[in-house]
Amino acid sequence: MTQEKLLQRLEADAESYRRGREHVAALAAEHNADLHRWAVRRGRRQRAAALAAAATLVAASFLVPHRSDTFVSGDLQCCTAQACSRINVIMATI
């Protein structure tokens, strides 16, 4: 093969490569045209979901009734009769 034919073949391969690259770039541009708007929508949805979850947890914390159980930290002499009777019931079930 002469140098001229080698150069022609290399140019043909290079042109084919360029066309393929341009085709892929065009496809990527077409498929990613809505990518920015999609990312913005997704971020908005995620923020709304996080806010809804936080609001639900805060509302649930206000709706949960306050527990009035007496907890004893080892010294049973200081507890009321009601607390001692509860402890006796708990210990009897164990």
Image: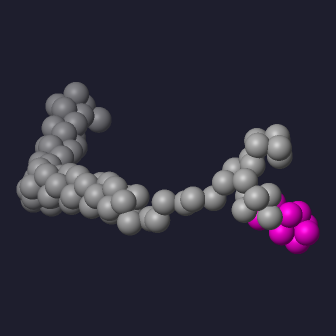
- The quadrant of the picture occupied by the C terminus is bottom right
The foreground one among 81 and 22 is 81
Q: Which residue ends up furthest to the front in the rendered image?
A: 81
Total tally of numbered discs in the picture = 0
With 54 as the anchor, is 15 left or right in this view?
left
Give the main secondary structure, helix, strand or loop, of the magenta stretch: helix
Q: Which residues are magenta?
A: 86-94
Q: Residue at x 14, y 58 (%)?
A: 41
The foreground one among 7 and 48 is 48
Q: Which of the colour schemes (rainbow, by chain, secondary structure, one colour) is used?
A: one colour
Q: Residue at x 83, y 44 (%)?
A: 77
Percent position of residue 52, x then y:
27, 61
90 magenta-colored: yes
Q: Which residue ends up furthest to the bottom in the rendered image?
A: 93
Q: Quadrant of residue 50?
A: bottom left
With 75 as the anchor, is 42 left or right in this view?
left
With 19 as the anchor, is 60 left or right in this view?
right
41 magenta-colored: no
Q: Residue at x 76, y 59 (%)?
A: 81
15 up-or-down from 82: above or below: above
Is residue 20 shown to the viewer in this render?
no
- The quadrant of the picture occupied by the N terminus is top left
Q: Residue at x 34, y 56 (%)?
A: 58
The foreground one among 45 and 83 is 83
8 up-or-down from 41: above or below: above
93 up-or-down from 69: above or below: below
With 26 as the anchor, is 62 left or right in this view?
right
Percent position of residue 10, x then y:
22, 37
Q: Quadrant of residue 54?
A: bottom left
